[in-house]
Image (cartoon, helix red, strand yellow):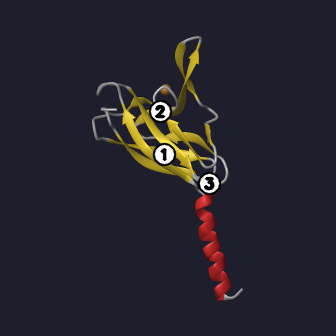
């Protein structure tokens, strides 16, 4: 392989790269009911720019004893929370919003109080994109 061919192969790899990890996180914010609350939630939007579906498998944080991906269900008019043990599939070229009344990252047993502007560490683990770590600002005004 000539140097020129090698360069072309590397360029092809670089172009192919983003399609494999086509997950972007946006509009993330964290809320707790009161400063004394023992639970909190994070809402955010996941965008999959890739050509294949990906799956949010796990969530983790040092900010709480337990962190789980939850959704809300409506059973006979009763709203209940459910642990999404299988995670959430993100379709290719689509966005999925974790929003109030729907999916959320649930923090149980907060290690400290959440005040306006605090940054909450959160790691999202995707099947294909791998681990994405972000810092989520507490926004009690939303
Ligand atoms: Cu929940």
Q: Are marks 1 and 2 in contact (CB under 8 Å)?
A: no
Which residue does the numbered mark 1 point to in the structure image?
A: 123
Mark in the foreground, 1 or 2 = 2
Q: Determine the CA span between mark 1 and mark 2.
A: 18 Å
Which residue does the numbered mark 2 point to in the structure image?
A: 99
Which residue does the numbered mark 3 point to in the structure image?
A: 50
Residue shown at 54%/28% (left/top)?
71
Question: Does 28 sit left or right of 19 as displayed?
Answer: left
The residue closer to the viewer here, 128 or 67, is 128
Looking at this rendering, what residue extends furthest in the right direction?
1
* Quarter residue 91 falls in: top right
Mark with earlier residue (3, 1): 3
Q: Determine the CA span between mark 2 and mark 3.
A: 22 Å
Looking at this rendering, what residue extends furthest in the bottom direction?
2
Residue 23, image x and y in percent?
55, 51
Mark with earlier residue (2, 3): 3
């Amino acid at each position: 392989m000539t140097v020129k061919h090698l360069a072309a192969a590397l360029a092809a790899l670089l172009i192919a790269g983003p399609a494999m990890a086509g997950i972007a996180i946006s509009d993330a914010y964290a809320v707790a009911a009161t400063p004394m609350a023992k639970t909190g939630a994070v809402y955010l939007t996941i965008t999959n720019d890739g050509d294949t579906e990906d799956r949010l498998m796990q969530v983790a944080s040092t900010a709480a004893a337990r962190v789980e991906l939850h959704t809300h269900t409506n059973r006979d008019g009763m709203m209940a929370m459910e642990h999404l043990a299988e995670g959430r599939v993100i379709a290719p070229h689509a966005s999925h919003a974790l929003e109030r009344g729907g999916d959320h990252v649930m923090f149980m047993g907060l290690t400290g109080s959440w005040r306006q502007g605090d940054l909450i560490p959160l790691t999202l683990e995707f099947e294909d994109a791998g681990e994405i770590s972000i810092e989520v600002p507490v926004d009690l005004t939303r």
